[in-house]
Image (tube, rainbow, N blue to C red):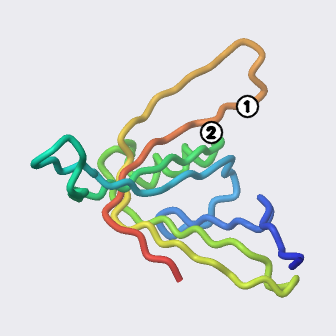
Amino acid sequence: MVNTKEYEWSDVTVVVAGRPVTGLRGVKYGSKQEKELLYAKGNKPHGIQHGNVDYSGELTLLQSEYQALKSAANGNILNMSFDIVVAYGNPENGDPITTDILKGVELTEDQTEWKQGDKFQEKSLPFIYIDQKSL
């Protein structure tokens, strides 16, 4: 049995548009690819055909981080394109650093929601991106 290190939230650093984000509450990103079964003679598939790859994700920020991003975008965050760098690992503990670079990120929604009893506001910002590089 090998005792390996599991990363935790405090090991995650995210840089959005060149700025480290301290008011980050969550980040989610990934890819998916269109796939379709190929049928010919008989009733069982003969193969799997591959189509387009789609990259998408979501940032969850505190209101203050959202306001800083909006200010950098001259008031319209839907018109800006930027990269996101996500790094995790703690070199002080001997962990290797894993880095993902999301290229050509654009936000797809900008909505505000308040509920009774809220102590702060979280902004969930869905996004799409062109490519992902891992280091």
Q: Are marks 2 and 1 in contact (CB under 8 Å)?
A: yes
Where is residue 22 drawn, in percent x and y?
70, 58
Does residue 50 sit above or below 37 in this rendering? below
Question: As shown in the figure, which amino acid type bears the numbered disc 1?
Answer: Phe
Say whether residue 13 is left or right of residue 36.
Answer: right
Question: As shown in the figure, which amino acid type bears the numbered disc 2?
Answer: Gln
Kindly identify which residue carries mark 1. Answer: 120
Q: Kindly state the secondary structure of the residue where label 2 is placed.
A: helix
User: Which residue is depicted at the point 72% across and 12% down?
Assistant: 116
User: Which residue is depicted at the point 18% across and 51% down?
Assistant: 38
Instruction: State how many labels appear.
Output: 2
Residue extending furthest toward the front: 42
Q: Kindly state the secondary structure of the residue where label 1 is placed.
A: loop
C-alpha separation, residue under disc 2 versus residue under disc 1: 8 Å
Does residue 91 sit above or below 120 in this rendering? below
Disc 2 residue crowd, few under 14, some 14–19, many 20+, Cα 10 Å: some
User: Which residue is depicted at the point 31% across and 63% down?
Assistant: 130
Kindly identify which residue carries mark 2. Answer: 63
Where is residue 105 drawn, in percent x and y?
38, 58
Where is residue 17 drawn, in percent x and y?
47, 64
Name the foreground residue: 134 vs 39.
Answer: 39
User: Which residue is depicted at the point 37% across and 56% down?
Assistant: 55
